[in-house]
Image (cartoon, rainbow, N blue to C red):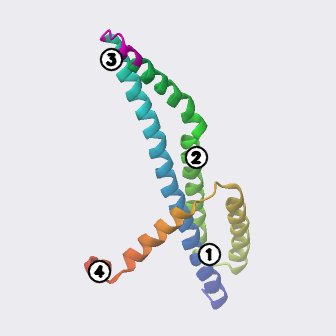
Amino acid sequence: MNDDQSDIARRGIGLSMQVSNRSIEHALSHDRYRRRSRMVSLVGALLAATAGASLWAGLTGTGAKVVAILGFLSALLAAVEPLLGYAKEAESHRVAGSSFGALGTSYYNLQYLSDRKQQEEDFKELDIQQARLEKESVHVERWAIRKREDEERRKRSPEALATAPSG
């Protein structure tokens, strides 16, 4: 590999790390929205089960009103959950994270191409793909970026490095 090729390889590795970070951020977002979706569904199911069990017990008076309220809340959660869009948002982040991860691998693999012209062509194509992905994929929220950055700092801390297994 000559100096020109190693320059492209270095840029490819750098961009690989950049898009891999984006992939991690999407994975963090996917996990958050998936948890939210599950929580809303679980609460709705618990309310429905409680209302059903209370109704089965044959409550009257105040108990019947509580059952009616629980049933109403359960139906409300079932109706609102799709409107909140947590499941859809989770899936969008999963797909985006996977796409950025694959792009990172492609950038990284540029270093193994022996033909300079092929490296340049692939690099340009990957840049186009990255720009398209950044434009078309769901937005990564600032909290996910901060969480990834905090985790990177934690891994580089003297305490983490001192306890890391030597290899």
What's the residue type where badge 4 is placed?
Glu
Q: Secondary structure at mark 1?
A: loop
Q: Label 3 belongs to which residue?
A: 53
Q: Quadrant of residue 151?
A: bottom left
Q: Is residue 4 above or below residue 124?
A: below
CA gap between label 2 and label 4 equals 36 Å
Element at label 3: helix
Which of marks 4 and 2 precedes in the sequence? 2
Q: Which mark is residue 113?
A: 1
Going by the image, does 133 lie left or right of 72? right
Q: Farthest residue in the front direction?
A: 62
Please identify, in this view, whether the residue under mark 4 or under mark 1 is nearer the observer: 4
Image quadrant where residue 113 sits: bottom right
Q: Nearer the viewer, mark 2 or mark 3?
A: 3
Quadrant where the C terminus is found in the figure: bottom left
- Residue type at tag 1: Leu
What mark, if any, has residue 89 been given in the picture?
2
The residue at which mark 4 appears reads as: 159
Q: Residues within 10 Å of mark 3 (few under 14, many from 20)?
A: few
Can you tell which of label 1 and label 2 is closer to the viewer? Answer: 2
Q: CA gap, disc 4 to disc 1? A: 39 Å
Observer-side mark, 1 or 3, equals 3
Check disc 2 and report its element: helix, strand or loop: helix
Magenta-tinted stretch: 57-65
Q: Residues within 10 Å of mark 2 (few under 14, many from 20)?
A: some
The residue nearer to you, when weighing 29 against 49, is 49
In three-dimensional space, the C-alpha distance between marks 2 and 3, rounded to whole angstroms, equals 33 Å
Image quadrant occupied by the N terminus: bottom right
